[in-house]
Image: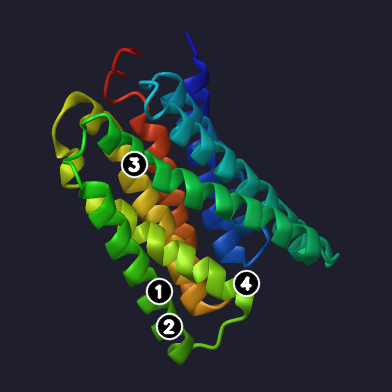
Amino acid sequence: MITLLMMTYALLGLLWLVWLLGLLSDSYARNLAVSLSNFLGAYALGWVAARSPAIVRPALGGLAAGLLFLGVGDLLFTYNVATGIGTQAVREVIYLVGVALFLLMGTLLPFRMEGHGFYPLGFFQRLALVAVLGGVLLSALTTLIRPLSLIELIYAGVAFYLTLLFVQQTPVLAGGRIGRYLQGVVWALVLGSLARVIYVLGGVPPALWSIVVYDILWLLAMSVLLLGVNRTPAPKNP
C-alpha cells in the first residue's frame, strides 16, 4: 500500500532530478525544485512536531511555519526568474517573516530543552552567547569581504547565529531517546543555515558556484528532514 510518506519520498527524488536537469540546462527548473523542497521540509517538521513531546512541539511547529514562508518566497523568486515580473517587494516581506520565525523558534528549542532537564543547567545561556557573539563577529567580517545591504546583513547575522546555535547542540543530543529523535532535525537545520551563509557570502547571480552549493546544501537539509522522520520511533507524548 502506497502511503503519504512514500509519495513524499518519491517527490523528493523527482525534485533532485528536476534540479539536476535545471542545472544542466541553466533553466528556472533548478529554482523551482529548491522552492518546492521547502514544502517537503515543512511537512517533515510538522510530522515530527505532531509526534514530539509538548516541550518541543511549539518550536518545531514554528520552524515548519518558517519553512512555509521561505517556500512561498522562493516560489515568488522563481516566478520572477521565469517571467521577468518583479516580486522583490512582496518577497522580502515574506522572507523576513520566515527568517523571524526561524530565529525565534530556533532559539526556543534549546531553551525549552534546558527548561525540562534535557540539557545541562546553564547550557542555553552559553549556547546563545557563543551564537550571538559569533554571529555578530562573522557578519562584521563578511562586510569586509563583500559589501552587504541592510537586509543582506540581517540575513547573514541570522544565518551565522543559527548555524552556531544548532552546531553546538549536536554533541548534547547524541544521547537519550528525545535527543536521538531530534538529532536528525538539528543536523538538517545546520545544513540549512550553512546553505544560507553560502548564499549570502557568494552573491545571487545563478551562474555563481555558491548558488549551486547553496542549492545542494538546502536540498540535502530538506532530504535529511524527510528521510529522518521514519527512522527513529517518536517518543510518547506526555
Q: Locate residue 86 relative to residue 57 in the image: left or right.
A: right
Residue 125: percent from left, percent from top:
27, 53
Q: x%, y% of residue 215?
A: 49, 60
Q: Are marks 4 and 1 in contact (CB under 8 Å)?
A: no
Q: Do residues under tags 1 and 3 come within 8 Å of each other at their CB atoms?
A: no
Q: Quadrant of residue 91?
A: bottom right
Tag of residue 140? 2
Q: Which residue is mark 3?
A: 111
Q: Which residue is mark 4?
A: 151
Tell me where residue 201 appears, x and y as whole percent: 47, 77
Q: Nearer the viewer, mark 4 or mark 1?
A: 1
Q: What's the distance in space between the residues labelled 4 and 1, CA to CA?
A: 15 Å
Residue with the mark numbered 1: 136
Q: Is residue 70 visible?
A: yes
The reply to whether dot 2 and dot 1 touch (C-beta < 8 Å) is: yes
Residue drawn at x 86%, y 64% is: 85
Q: In the image, what residue type sits under mark 3?
A: Phe
Residue 78 x %, y %:
71, 58
Is tag 2's residue or tag 3's residue first in the polypeptide sequence? 3
Q: What is the C-alpha distance between the residues marked 3 and 4?
A: 27 Å
Outermost residue toward the right in this view: 85
Please tell me which residue is depicted at 32% across the width and 42% down the height of the picture.
110
Q: In 3D space, how far apart are the residues under numbered discs 1 and 3 (Cα atoms)?
A: 21 Å
Mark 1 is surrounded, within 10 Å at the Cα level, by few (under 14), some (14 to 19) or many (20 or more) other residues, namely some
